Image: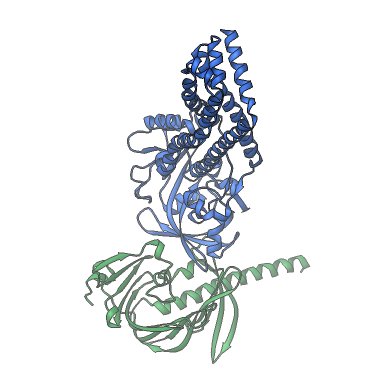
């Protein structure tokens, strides 16, 4: 048996290089197909990764806790008390990387020359550091120092629209606890920049305690943002928190807080398989054709081998081995090519010329292809599997020749 | 006296003088605001909004009491007649007979202009912020046409809800504001409220015609003319209520 498979393999290998030109062409086709497949997957993954991680940073967090009516009516009427007891204990769990309570209200910010509606977020800058984007993205001035900081951090674009600047005062106006208008002057202490320009206009940040004082809401907050240790384990974290949070609050994971983002993520895995199969189908016509030609050319030779006592099963094995070898070499070349391309683009591809379109989808304008080992294994497995099936038909046909007829064939 | 004592005495005297000056400046501003609003008032005002390509004139009836209650109703032109605004303790409501609804002006609209004029809703609803939310300083005293004119610079407190860097008021010794200028935080002049005519109405000398204009935009202004005015009259308590806003009884 071992001797047979040795012979089968050697025959397959030699047959492959008998017509090296044909083999080289089909190899190039396979390698190019695999390269396109892996590169496109990595590219799409990169786009989705950046969408999801930016999305989670602007949600922010993997899980959020709100008053049940807050998401429908995000005003000071729908607040909750800061976590205590069981919830506070479960927020200190091992799977929680960081959590922060925030106050979030719609507000109007005005300067001498303009006024704009924003979402004003009162944060605890220390707890917030790893959760949302502000801390790393303050490009001018300083970030808020603690939750009692009297300053305001605005986005670059908002500041431009207001024709204001760091160090200047602006007026914040919003609805206070008993529906009265409350307003106060704030000094702009810092500016942040975001890869997504619309974010810069949408969010303004102030100290949590400062905002609570302005609104007259005591120690109550609008939301609790929880960042888990791993995005992929968000569901377990969500279930655990929902268990301990009690019935008077609403606990939601990121993929429901931003359901577009969640749906995109779920579609992605299905999309990868569809993509691989589509490319392979295009590839398989050339592939099967090559094998069929190789069989036709060798009808006499196959007849001779059968006449010498080679079993039909061994004939099948030999042709299948030949096609698997062909695919394996193609896969290896394609993978190396894809890795090389992705590696050379690891700084990201600048798509700022179509940046506005990408922003609508929530993706940044610089995309970094991201290659998962799972995707590579999946595409290799699918290509080998389908290749095996495709090569069966010419192989079986070859094994059914009658030795006498085959030998006399011109 | 030793030199150091002289210096100390001088410093104390100077500080005392400055405090007095600042107190004085605040009093001048307060007196001017009180003169303008009075204890209560009732009158008819004509507002002219001018833009390069159009102009419109509205006649308004107004009632005020104290510093935080006011009601304004449009009399002319006909199609706007009945539109009314009630301001009370910093909040503001409007009523339009066409939709027969009272609408509370949300905070997001407080910076929008009032009835298309160069005044914001906020400027209409709050008049006395200028007294307490600013540091006032008397810059100089001029003589002009037989009157003393005080030039006062008012700088808003750090956390006052004021966007301006500073405001300069020119107030005549009979408590009439001649000019109220607004400067941004870089010191650029943005807009001014100028008194163009002074006259007697309701037994007081007041600014009869004032014009608000933006410095950076040419040919855009809003003029307010007092047609008749009564001061310190007794007004019914029900006047400044939402129900009176919707169903006027006076």
The residue positioned 43% from the left and 29% from the top of the image is A236
| Count of numbered labels shown in the rendering | 0
Q: Position of residue B74 (x, y in %)?
A: 30, 79
The quadrant in which residue A89 appears is top left
Q: Residue A203 vs residue A23: left or right?
A: left
Q: Is residue A310 visible?
A: yes
Q: Position of residue B78 (x, y in %)?
A: 27, 82
In the picture shown, does residue A378 fall above or below B40?
above
- Identify the image's colour scheme: rainbow, by chain, secondary structure or one colour: by chain
* Foreground of the two, A191 or A362: A362
* Foreground of the two, B52 or A409: A409
Residue extending furthest toward the right: B2
Q: Residue A194 vs residue B229: left or right?
A: right
Q: Position of residue A392 (x, y in %)?
A: 47, 23
In which quadrant of the rendered image does the N terminus of chain B lie?
bottom right
In which quadrant of the rendered image does the C terminus of chain B lie?
bottom left
Q: Is residue A82 visible?
A: no
* Foreground of the two, A260 or A170: A260
In the picture shown, does residue B152 fall above or below A406?
below
**Which chain, by letter, is blue?**
A
Q: Position of residue B142 (x, y in %)?
A: 59, 85
Residue extending furthest toward the bottom: B145
Q: Residue A303 vs residue B239: left or right?
A: right
What is the display colour for chain B?
green
* Foreground of the two, A283 or B53: A283
The quadrant in which residue A410 appears is top right
The residue positioned 62% from the left and 39% from the top of the image is A342
The residue positioned 61% from the left and 32% from the top of the image is A22
């Amino acid at each position: 048996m071992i001797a047979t498979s040795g012979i089968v393999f050697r025959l397959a290998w030699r047959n492959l290089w008998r017509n090296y030109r044909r083999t080289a062409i089909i190899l190039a086709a396979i390698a190019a197909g695999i390269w396109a497949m892996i590169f496109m997957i990595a590219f799409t993954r990169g786009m989705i990764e950046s969408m999801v991680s930016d999305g989670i940073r602007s949600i922010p967090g993997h899980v959020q806790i709100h008053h049940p009516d807050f998401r429908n009516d995000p005003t000071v009427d729908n607040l909750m008390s800061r976590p205590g007891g069981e919830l506070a204990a479960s927020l200190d769990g091992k799977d929680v990387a960081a959590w922060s309570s925030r106050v979030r209200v719609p507000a109007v910010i005005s300067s001498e020359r303009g006024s704009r509606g924003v979402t004003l977020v009162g944060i605890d800058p220390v707890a917030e550091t790893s959760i949302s984007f502000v801390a790393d993205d303050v490009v001018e001035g300083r970030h808020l120092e603690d939750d009692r900081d009297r300053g305001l951090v605005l986005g670059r674009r908002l500041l431009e629209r207001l024709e204001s600047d760091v160090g200047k005062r602006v007026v914040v106006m919003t609805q206070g606890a008993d529906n009265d208008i409350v307003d106060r002057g704030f000094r702009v202490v810092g500016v942040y920049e975001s890869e997504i320009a619309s974010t810069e206009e949408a969010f303004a940040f102030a100290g949590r305690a400062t905002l609570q004082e302005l609104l007259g809401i005591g120690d109550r907050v609008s939301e609790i943002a929880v960042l888990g240790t791993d995005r992929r384990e968000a569901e377990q974290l969500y279930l655990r928190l929902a268990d301990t949070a009690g019935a008077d609050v609403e606990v939601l994971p990121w993929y429901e807080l931003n359901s577009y983002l969640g749906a995109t993520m779920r579609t992605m895995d299905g999309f990868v398989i569809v993509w691989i199969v589509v490319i392979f189908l295009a590839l398989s016509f050339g592939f099967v054709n090559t094998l069929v030609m190789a069989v036709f050319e060798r009808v006499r030779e196959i007849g001779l081998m059968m006449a010498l006592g080679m079993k039909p099963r061994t004939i099948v094995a030999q042709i299948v081995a030949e096609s698997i070898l062909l695919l394996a070499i193609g896969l290896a070349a394609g993978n190396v090519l894809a890795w090389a391309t992705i590696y050379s683009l690891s700084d990201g591809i600048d798509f700022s010329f179509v940046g506005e379109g990408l922003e609508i989808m929530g993706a940044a304008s610089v995309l970094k292809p991201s290659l998962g080992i799972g995707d590579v294994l999946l595409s290799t497995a699918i290509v080998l599997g389908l290749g095996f099936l495709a090569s069966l038909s010419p192989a079986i046909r070859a094994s059914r020749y009658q030795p006498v007829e085959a030998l006399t064939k011109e | 006296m030793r030199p150091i004592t002289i210096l100390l005495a001088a410093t104390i005297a100077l500080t005392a003088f400055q405090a007095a000056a600042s107190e004085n400046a605040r009093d001048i501003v307060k007196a001017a605001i009180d003169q303008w609003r009075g204890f209560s008032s009732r009158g008819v005002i004509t507002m002219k909004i001018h833009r390069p390509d159009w102009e419109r004139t509205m006649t308004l009836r107004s009632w005020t009491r104290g510093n935080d209650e006011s009601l304004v109703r449009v009399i002319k032109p006909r199609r706007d007649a009945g539109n009314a605004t009630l301001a009370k303790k910093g909040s503001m409501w409007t009523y339009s007979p066409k939709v027969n609804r009272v609408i509370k002006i949300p905070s997001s609209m407080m910076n929008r202009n009032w009835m298309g004029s160069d005044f914001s809703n906020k400027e209409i609803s709050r008049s006395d912020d200028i007294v307490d939310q600013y540091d006032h300083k008397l810059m100089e005293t001029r003589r002009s046409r037989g009157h003393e004119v005080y030039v006062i610079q008012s700088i808003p407190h750090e956390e006052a809800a004021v966007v301006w860097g500073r405001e300069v008021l020119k107030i005549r010794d009979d408590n009439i504001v001649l000019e109220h200028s607004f400067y941004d935080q870089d010191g650029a002049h943005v807009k001014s409220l100028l008194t163009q005519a002074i006259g007697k109405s309701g037994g007081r000398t007041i600014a009869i015609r004032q014009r608000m204009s933006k410095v950076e935009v040419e040919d855009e202004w809003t003029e307010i003319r007092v047609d008749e005015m009564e001061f310190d009259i007794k007004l019914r308590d029900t006047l400044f209520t939402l129900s009176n806003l919707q169903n006027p009884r006076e």
